[in-house]
Amino acid sequence: MKLADNKATLSFSNGSPSVEMPVYQGSIGPDVIDIRKLYAQTGMFTYDPGFLSTASCQSAITFIDGDKGELLYRGYPIEQLATQCDFMETCHLLLYGDLPNASKKAEFSKTVRMHTMVNEQMQFFLRGFRRDAHPMAIMTGLVGALSAFYHDSTDINNPEHRDISAIRLIAKMPTLVAMAYKYSVGQPFMYPKNELSYAGNFLHMMFATPCEPYTVSPVLERALDRIFILHADHEQNASTSTVRLCGSSGTNPFAAIAAGVACLWGPAHGGANEACLNMLEDIQKMGGVSKVGEFMEKVKDKNSGVKLMGFGHRVYKNYDPRAKLMQETCKEVLQELGLENDPLFKLAMQLEKIALEDEYFVSRKLYPNVDFYSGIVQRAIGIPVGLFTAVFALARTVGWIAQLNEMIGDPEYKIGRPRQLFTGSERRDVKPLAGR
Ligand code: CMC
């Protein structure tokens, strides 16, 4: 970390001595005030629920400029990665710090391919779930269960274990998501086919059956690959911070990633793609485009509890660059499938148009986020709504593991242990039961 020339001084109105704190500079983005000695010097904590002003770590992986609407993985703009690279290259970039050359790419892709199968026993574990279980419930269980099957890669302090668990997680996530889907529809599991690309293989495991030949559509394969790239990492979001916090106790990588899957499930985070599609379907059932105005009034009414899902972001106060790319992919996919007049897409465009002109959204800087269009693309590909967040988890796994490994390699890393402002009862004595 690079010290800035200036320091921060914290002064108190009650005459307590002021405290000087160092300031560090990042390569881009806001500087940070180092408050680590604050408690020792003043006996006080800082208070920042929701981490609105708190950097929880230093990281060199992903940078977001929320005002500009810019997203960089290891310095590369997401627009260039999405149009010039594939997901395997993006995984290499996030994990190892740079884009691979052709031979490194081939070697990395081969290594991932060699790990796509899961221990056969995993399917018996999966069969313990109800057929109608939510795929994210299944994924939380399955990913955690990997630690019970791959004992030789569970030591987070061993660099070789970390490396192999990273590859295993990236390679096996598509297999697990597809197994969760096949189980829900009562079809046989399809083993991975390693001559296919990462996205192609996922499509094959999802939609092929042992009875019919299955050909991967290059347009859908490219669309899915783009979904994976756009979701691969997003700096210190809720699920990534969960993975870091969970991993900071020294637990194994599979357990830490399972915690990330659980966090991602929530509708304020990865679950928004499912919630957004459900919202579009609900409006469609109410009457479609003609009901958009009425729906928007509900969204703006604080007492209704209704939100425009797929809109707003803690960091982006401008158009989410991933949403732009996703909208492009959405058009391409719908055209390929002859669904240009898809009513949900039309509805989404109409909602977006109104929201971008409406004072409520403009003044709060609420723009579409990645989830606004990703659900429509996934649905067009044939992925059921309940599986959307699992596909997000599949794609985000590389980001989680890159962030986890970065944390373990950071000499400043400590177990995460926030403090609190206690507002409960002061010390009191227990009265005998009869006297309470
Ligand atoms: N619809 C209506 N109002 C909204 C929305 C929305 N989608 N998002 C924010 N607002 C309002 C909010 O009520 C608040 O208004 P006011 O200042 O009058 O109280 C203001 O905008 C600021 O919102 P906030 O809740 O303080 O912002 P936050 O940073 O805590 O929350 C968010 C960010 C993403 C949780 C929120 O915008 C939201 O719930 N959006 C819908 C869910 C969604 O699409 N999530 C996906 C996020 S991107 C992918 C991912 O991270 O997984």
Image (cartoon, rainbow, N blue to C red):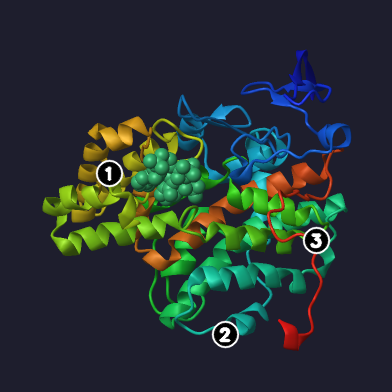
Q: Position of residue 344 (x, y in %)?
A: 23, 54
Q: Residues within 10 Å of mark 3 (few under 14, many from 20)?
A: some
Name the residue at 39% across, 70% down. Answer: 213
Q: Position of residue 219 (x, y in %)?
A: 36, 49
| Front tag of 2 and 3 | 3
Q: Position of residue 179 (x, y in %)?
A: 53, 73
Q: Residues within 10 Å of mark 2 (few under 14, many from 20)?
A: few
Q: Nearer the viewer, residue 5 or 298?
A: 298
Label 3 element class:
loop
| Front tag of 3 and 1 | 3
Q: How many marks?
A: 3
Q: Residues within 10 Å of mark 1 (few under 14, many from 20)?
A: some
Residue 119 shows in the view: yes
Label 1 element class:
helix
**For residue 429, above or below residue 91:** below
| Sequence-wise first label, 2 or 1 | 2
| Sequence-wise first label, 2 or 3 | 2
Which residue is identified by label 1? 331
Cα–Cα span, label 3 and label 1? 43 Å
Which residue is identified by label 3? 251
Q: Position of residue 311 (x, y in %)?
A: 37, 44
Name the residue at 50% across, 52% down. Answer: 269
Disc 2 vs disc 1: Cβ atoms closer than 8 Å?
A: no
**For residue 45, above or below residue 258:** above
Which residue is identified by label 2? 127
